[in-house]
Image: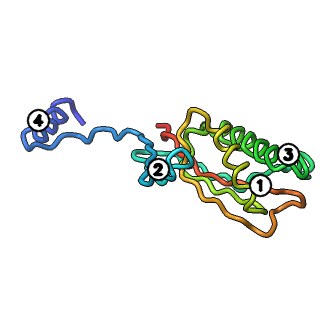
Amino acid sequence: MPVSARLAALSLMLVAGVAPAAAQEFKKENFNYSKFATGAFSEAATVEGPAKLIYLAGIGSEDPDSGVARHADNFLEQCRFAWSKVKQALAANGATLSDIVKATSYVTDVRYRDEMRQCRVETFKGLPLPPHTFLQVVALARPGMMFEVDVVAAVAAKK
């Protein structure tokens, strides 16, 4: 298209009050609506703008090579190890813990709730706690596993 035709089209858009759309920016926010949830988890997270979504499958204390559960009978260490693997998987996809928009934790005994909370507070120190669902299940994927977590994260889409 000749330069004169492009200038004419741009002039017409400006006269008509139509301007090219501004680029939409990426924004992630966490929210709490209940006092009891503050400091434990966010009740909602919103993502606006062009985003790359990252879905991580359930990650537990499995050894990356053998698949055998590490830290037998030690819930807190299994939880810490699982979250360290989450951090690695997120980093491999250009994300960090602060990019998580939803987490679901699975435990084999609800009595581990306080230890799970301690683990999350350690893991997310200084970061907003993402929306979180806590579930007790009969068993997990590997014998000896006591904790598993799956997460969804969002980062700005690359152009």
Residue at 66% x, 48% y is 117
Residue 7: give x, y in percent of width and height.
16, 32
Horizontal side of residue 139 vs 100, given as left or right: right
Q: Which residue is mark 2?
A: 45
Of the two numbered discs 2 and 4 on the same chain, state the one appearing first in sequence: 4
Q: Give the percent coordinates (x, y) of residue 19.
A: 18, 40
Q: Amino acid at mark 1?
A: Phe
Q: Nearer the viewer's eye, disc 1 or disc 4? A: 1
Residue type beneath disc 4:
Ser
Amino acid identity at mark 3: Pro
The local secondary structure at tag 1 comes to strand
From mark 3 to mark 4, how far is it between C-alphas? 61 Å
Is residue 4 shown above or below 87? Answer: above
Residue 124 or residue 7, whichever sits in front: 124
Q: How is the image coloured?
A: rainbow
Q: Residue extending furthest top? A: 3
> Which residue is disc 1 drawn over?
147
Q: Residues within 10 Å of mark 1 (few under 14, many from 20)?
A: many
User: What distance separates the C-alpha of mark 1 from that of mark 3?
Assistant: 16 Å
Rendered image: mark on residue 64: 3
Which is more foreground, mark 2 or mark 1? 1
Label 3: how many Cα within 10 Å (few below 14, some 14–19, many 20+): few
Which one is in front in this view, the residue at disc 3 or the one at disc 4?
A: 3
Q: Which residue is mark 4?
A: 11
Instruction: Please report whichever mark, 3 or 4, sits nearer to the chain's N-terminal start.
Output: 4
Label 2, residues with CA under 10 Å away: few <14, some 14-19, many ≥20: some
Mark closest to the chain's N terminus, 2 or 1: 2
